[in-house]
Image (cartoon, rainbow, N blue to C red):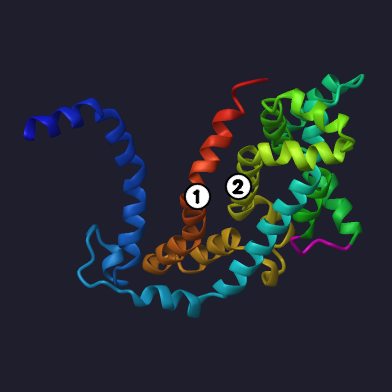
Amino acid sequence: MTRTVLSWVGNRAILIAIGIIFVAPVVFVVLTSLMTSDQALTATLIPHHWEWSNYKNVFDAAPLARWFGNSMMYAVLATVFMLLSSVPAAYVLAKIKFRGSGFLFLCIIVTMLLPPQVTAVPVYVMWSHLGLTGSLWPLILPNLLGDAFSIFLMRQFFMTVPREYVDAARMDGCGEWGALLKVVVPMAKPGIAAAALFMFFQCWNDYYGPLLYTSENAAHWPVAYGLATFRGAHGTNWELTMAMTVLVMTPIVLLFFFAQRIFVEGITVTGIKG
């Protein structure tokens, strides 16, 4: 029995080491969030007294519920808007051949290489003239025009759907919208789900965008920016900062835990065919 265990550990030593490297910081954050204020400033790793009240105190020290609501609105609306615009765009690039389609796809790829800081000033001026600065709408509304990475990801997945199925739907009188909604979307659910999860994670963890547009309006802060400001204001209260960090991470961890199978499937299949 011992020999079998040692053999199993030996064969997976590198994976175990990598797993420990990734898990150790999370364990440290969770343990620190359960320490007293005095112990959190020491080098002790295990709490002497488990302070579960830290998680309640976080809600008293900051408007965490409002920050969660803002992040949820930002992530959900941005994801829905992205799907409404990017799914048809990806379908067109994958299943409809027209002059210039390759060049159009190349332009979409190029926009992925453009750092957002390059266009930050003119885009901010535009939203300022529209009177939407100080809110999350400048970060949500652009997704109605599509997201380059999401279009690329879903286009690669749509390419794996046999063209014969789409042609058969067209011959049955479905049209392009019918072929998309009745054939491609049901067969490409893993790829669409992967793109949606990527967008949701990106919005939930977004710090730069809220810093640019909502920093002067605390009522519209999401959790990522709120956590950063909380850490600056409570620099010595590491137990509260870590407790808030755990609360901010929890929705993302749970979402990925329940959707990991379809997420991994979507990521894996998109690399099969270009």
- Residue in view at x 19 percent, y 27 percent: 10
Magenta-drawn segment = 131-136
Near mark 2 (Cα within 10 A), the count class, few <14, some 14-19 or many ≥20, is many
| Residue 132 highlighted magenta (yes or no) | yes
Q: Dominant secondary structure of the magenta stretch?
A: loop
Circles 1 and 2: CB atoms closer than 8 Å: yes
- Quarter of the figure that contains the N terminus: top left
- Compare residues 244 and 120 and report the one nearer the observer: 244
Q: Which residue is mark 1?
A: 256
- Snapshot quadrant of residue 157: top right
Q: Is residue 86 visible?
A: no
First in sequence: mark 1 vs mark 2:
2
- Quarter of the figure that contains the C terminus: top right
As helix, strand or loop, the secondary structure at mark 1 comes to helix
Q: Identity of the amino acid at label 2?
A: Leu
As helix, strand or loop, the secondary structure at mark 2 comes to helix
- Residue in view at x 64 percent, y 20 percent: 273
Q: Is residue 68 visible?
A: yes
